[in-house]
Amino acid sequence: MAVVAATALATPLLLGAAPHHGHSHGSGPSQEAAKLSRELVKNASARDAYRHLQQFQAIADSAGGHRAAGSLGHDASAAYVYRQLQRAGYQVSYESFRFDYTETLAEKLALVSPTSRDVTIKAMTFTPSTRVGGLTAGLVAVPADDTSGCEASDYASANFTGKIALIKRGGCPFADKQAAAATAGAAGAVIYNNTEGLLSGTLGDATAGRIPTGGITQEEGAELVADLAAGEVTVSFEIRQLQEERTTRNVIAETRGGNAAKTVVLGAHLDSVTEGPGINDNGSGSAGLLEVALELAKSKSKPANKVRFAWWSAEENGLLGSEAYVAGLSEKQRQQIKLYLNFDMIASPNGVQFVYDGDDSDGVGAGPGPEGSAQLERDINTFLDGKRKKHEGTDFSGRSDYGPFIEIGIPSGGTFTGAEGFKTAAQAKTYGGQAGVAYDPCYHAACDDLDNLDMRHFDINIDVIANAVGTYAHDLRSLTRPVTPAPSTGTPGGGGGLHDGHGHEVTE
């Protein structure tokens, strides 16, 4: 891994200046774990973590409204986290990597004739750009079927030269749809969803884009198809996006003591999307993790195992920070990591208490995590049961930074309170909130600010982090204890489809 800065403090706090061997006064790992977990759960709170969210909001406000990887807002957020951990006595480092930065500059679609109205459109990641001011052109619908717009024959029924192609989602990657439209002569592509919600998509990489492409809702698509059935339609279309290679960095902090052969890793992504400050997504996970790390530093405990905290960058660009970290591990370092816990969006305002389904007992989506993942799920569920907090499983969908760890066989788990998926009536009855409304109505939007939080969810998930840190800092034996599978309702907590990262859909 590319470590560009590391700080060796002359006077570390209570994190241990040397590896800790054994326990004094005859106390065993379970007793030490129970003592530390109680202390951390008691002392780490949403109220204290909220001050970190206030800092993230202030940073975003001073840096163009966001904290996206590769931006001044993310750099300042990383520096804030680094300084807090440095002062607490951790061994802290930056890990830098290069990536393709994208920022949408314009996304507009409007009917010019026969009527006039605006249509909400979202530029796809890695889309080519129109000229400034966009273009005015005829709209032509591609015949709708299960593979609409995927093949050259789909464009044979009409003249698409210089026109904007209207294409239904489904059947193949968005990159394939816009490429086929480009081959047919289209000047741009508008892809409408085949499920509820605005379509947030990606073309995969900068080399795939051939024509400006954006996504719209299923409802807007149906209305445009109806307009076209009545006669010719002309639209004004502008999609512009900045794309350039930039450098960003993860923040990694670990206890100075503890057995490196038994390393416990907990992480959260620090970056936001460019559309907003990212206070729930994922300032919440980042702030909760930071608060527990600071409380661990204040404790009198000397962890028997090494505890490592990570704040990932460029998660929103496709899990790039965690991927870079995992790729940089030697085989020995991989074997030393005994578990990974991920905390992403832990304060959704209309949220549900999701726990990653490590044993796939819910039978939803992806299969089980690596051996030990079922135990991590069980341990979190047991803690929540002890607090009399309702919870349910969520699929290892690959949408957050546990993905790279699962791929190399590291037991993984964590919590999540939901993204753009819609709360069911049963969930509303269990957790409160509104059925039929997104878990986070401000997901990937400018309104993901300090008002976009549920402090109760925030508090209980910080307790989950605190309990996990306290427990696994001393005792990993639960990872080998058998689990009796217990299915829950097991919903994903977000939209369907394949993703390049946290919510950027690439295909059907």
Image: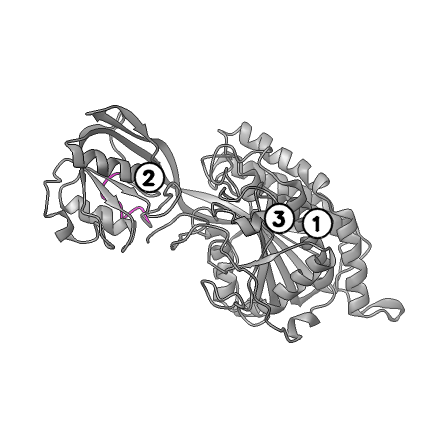
Residue 208 part of the magenta-drawn span: yes
Q: Residue at x 67, y 75 (%)?
A: 481
Give the numbered dot on residue 292.
1
| Residue for badge 2 | 219
How many other residues sit within 10 Å of disc 1, few (<14), some (14-19) or many (≥20)? many
Q: Quadrant of the C terminus?
A: bottom left
Q: Give coordinates of residue 236: x percent, y percent.
A: 24, 28
Instruction: Give the magenta part as a residue range.
Output: 205-217
The amino acid pointed to by label 3 is Tyr
Looking at the rendered structure, the secondary structure element under dot 3 is helix
Looking at the rendered structure, the secondary structure element under dot 1 is helix
Look at the image and tell me whether residue 81 can be seen: yes
How many other residues sit within 10 Å of disc 3, few (<14), some (14-19) or many (≥20)? some
Mark 2 and mark 3: span between their CA atoms? 29 Å
**In this view of the protein, which residue sits in the foreground, 185 or 115?**
115
Residue 484 part of the magenta-drawn span: no
Mark 1 and mark 3: span between their CA atoms? 25 Å
Q: Residue at x 15, y 50 (%)?
A: 154
**In this view of the protein, which residue sits in the foreground, 255 or 58?**
58
Which badge, 2 or 3, is on the more N-terminal residue? 2
Mark 2 and mark 1: span between their CA atoms? 44 Å
| Residue for badge 3 | 431
User: What is the basis of the colouring in this image?
Assistant: one colour
Q: Give coordinates of residue 155: x percent, y percent.
A: 14, 47
The amino acid pointed to by label 2 is Glu
